[in-house]
Image: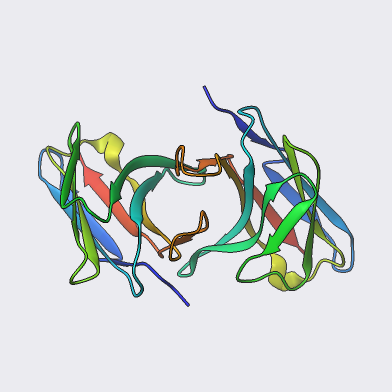
């Protein structure tokens, strides 16, 4: 079974803190994604990566950065957390190149910034 | 901008009834996927339909695609309480491996 794990299910941070969200997948997938999910807005893509050290901005990259030093691990960084970054964060992974387009999701991290 | 928009936003039915939800999108696609999300959890892939397919089945799921209308529908037959979840469509943004998700339909199946 494909497994995508996220470092925390729930996280509470203070405004201005640096926050790291980690995601690990065990299927040797090339692509990895970070989304945020807010009520009424669905899933919005923050960043994605199609290879180690490669990244591309999604629709809402402002206030976020990412790191992919190893194929299985994709980190989302909030440089200075703000209350409007309170959200559910979902990580996903998939194969690259048309073998399969299915994305496998982690359980999500519910982040609250106070 | 949202590529996929699901309709209705919420749906409540009795166990055993069929549930139909719709997805509309704006630009041309190569394929469209449907996902399910149980409350507070990650999404699970249900089915993928390619742009050259009109209908696809998987168990109690039936998906249709009308590229001329830029719309898709997901039908769940003989629904069960366990089908209670949010359902999302996701479209590829013009041939890339990035997918754009809609806002979802919340389905509640009453026992």
Number of callouts in the render? 0
The relative height of residue A100 versus residue A59 in the rendered view (above or below) is above
Quarter of image, res A101: top left
Residue closest to the far right: A17
> Residue A32: horizontal and vertical position, in percent?
64, 46
Viewport quadrant of the C terminus of chain B: top left
User: At x 16% / y 52%, what residue is drawn?
Assistant: B54
Residue closest to the far bottom: B1
Q: Nearer the viewer, residue A111 or A69?
A: A69
Quarter of image, res A105: top right
The relative height of residue A32 versus residue B78 in the rendered view (above or below) is below
> Residue B92: horizontal and vertical position, in percent?
43, 59
Quarter of image, res B103: bottom left
Q: Tell me if I can see residue B86 in this picture.
A: no
Q: Nearer the viewer, residue A70 or B12?
A: A70
Q: Nearer the viewer, residue A52 or B63?
A: A52
> Residue A34: horizontal and vertical position, in percent?
64, 54
The relative height of residue B98 versus residue A57 in the rendered view (above or below) is above
User: In the picture provided, is A109 more to the left or to the right than B99?
Assistant: right
User: Which color scheme is applied?
Assistant: rainbow
Q: Tell me if I can see residue A77 in this picture.
A: yes
User: At x 24% / y 69%, what residue is drawn?
Assistant: B70
């Amino acid at each position: 079974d494909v497994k995508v794990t996220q470092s925390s299910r729930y996280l509470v941070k203070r405004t201005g803190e640096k926050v790291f969200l980690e995601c690990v997948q065990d299927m040797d997938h090339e692509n990895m994604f970070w989304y945020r999910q807010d009520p009424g807005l669905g899933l919005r893509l923050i960043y994605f990566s199609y290879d180690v050290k490669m990244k591309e901005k999604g629709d809402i990259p402002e206030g976020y950065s990412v790191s992919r030093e190893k194929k299985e691990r994709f980190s989302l960084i909030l440089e200075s957390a703000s209350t409007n970054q309170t959200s559910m964060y979902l990580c996903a992974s998939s194969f690259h190149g048309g073998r399969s387009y299915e994305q496998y999701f982690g359980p999500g991290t519910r982040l609250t910034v106070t | 901008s949202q590529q996929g928009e699901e309709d209705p936003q919420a749906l409540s039915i009795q166990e055993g009834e069929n549930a139909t939800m719709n997805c509309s999108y704006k630009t041309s696609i190569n394929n469209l996927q449907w996902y399910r999300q149980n409350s507070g959890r990650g999404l699970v892939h249900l089915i993928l339909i390619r742009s050259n397919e009109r209908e696809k089945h998987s168990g109690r799921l039936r998906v249709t695609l009308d590229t001329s209308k830029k719309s898709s529908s997901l039908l769940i037959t003989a629904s069960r309480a366990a089908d209670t979840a949010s359902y999302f469509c996701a479209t590829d943004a013009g041939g890339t491996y990035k997918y754009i998700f809609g806002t979802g339909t919340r389905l509640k199946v009453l026992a």
